[in-house]
Amino acid sequence: MSDAELTVTVAGPVATVVIRNPARRNAMTPAMWRQLPVLLDGLEADPAVRVLVLTGAGGTFCAGADLGDLDELLEAGDGSIAVAAEERLAAFGRPTVAAIEGACVGGGCQLAVACDLRFAAVDARFGVPPARLGLVYPAPTTRRLARLVGPSAAKHLLFTSELVDAERSLRIGLVDEVLPADALAARVAAVTATIAERSRLTVAAAKEIVDGRADADRIAWWHGQVRESGEAREGIAAVTERRAPRFGWTPPAAG
């Protein structure tokens, strides 16, 4: 029986997905790529979940795709199960945070970049290795990387396949913060707790708009939600009364 799997825990409003494949530094197997969208569907359907954390077990985020199963990923190109998992993660309806230690390479970097925020330990190392392997990095993945770090930095990562440390990753915008390894979990917990306290309406709308997934009609819908929900009135009242806001908006049920 394989011990390669994704595990999920939910603590209050925060769900944590952990990548586990100890024999291969948490490399993603085909079964794990297929498992991720299913897990995300379930978590998105849970109204209690407000934030998602993605991390790796044992001090390593993810060393990429399991190359022993490369044929399956090569066969489909941009239609691969890895790209499908990445796209589902990017479209997840709640804020997503990657908590990164150790290797974050190839498919691991692909998953981290698909998250909204990335917090790295000082020992984290990032790499995009297709040029060492003779592969073409998927187009959606390449574009997402370029939007995050800019064309020049993306080309450097892709052309050289060099590993870059956490500090360089911070300078180019690949990660948002770099922390001592023993401070990473506490910082991620503090950030996710803060996000969970904020207006879900504001956060959900911001994610859609920043990601370019909201057209004019959808943006008008979001403004309508502000008017109908009373969310802004509650926020302003809380400031005036010097108390914590009691935001009540929840995402409409799918379908």
Image: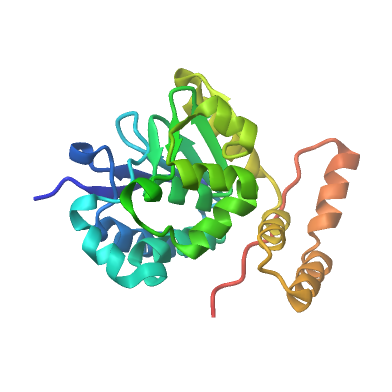
Query: Which residue is rendered at x = 28% and y = 41% of the image?
Result: 26
* Pick the front one: 191 or 72: 72
Number of marks: 0
**31 relative to 1 in the view: left or right:** right
Its colouring scheme is: rainbow
* Residue 92 is at least partly visible in this image: no
Q: In this view, does 180 lie above or below 102?
A: above
Residue 34 lies in what quarter of the image? bottom left
Residue 119 lies in what quarter of the image? top right
**71 relative to 117 in the view: left or right:** left
Query: Which residue is rendered at x = 62% and y = 65% of the image?
Result: 251
* Residue 47 x, y percent position in the rendering: 52, 60
* Residue 250 is at least partly visible in this image: yes
- Most extreme residue toward the left is 1
Query: Which residue is rendered at x = 70% and y = 57% of the image?
Result: 210
Q: Is residue 248 above or below residue 80?
A: above
- Most extreme residue toward the right is 240
* Residue 137 x, y percent position in the rendering: 43, 57
Query: Which residue is rendered at x = 42% and y = 41% of the image?
Result: 161
* Pick the front one: 91 or 249: 91
In the picture, the quarter occupied by the C terminus is bottom right
* Residue 165 x, y percent position in the rendering: 49, 27
* Pick the front one: 239 or 84: 84
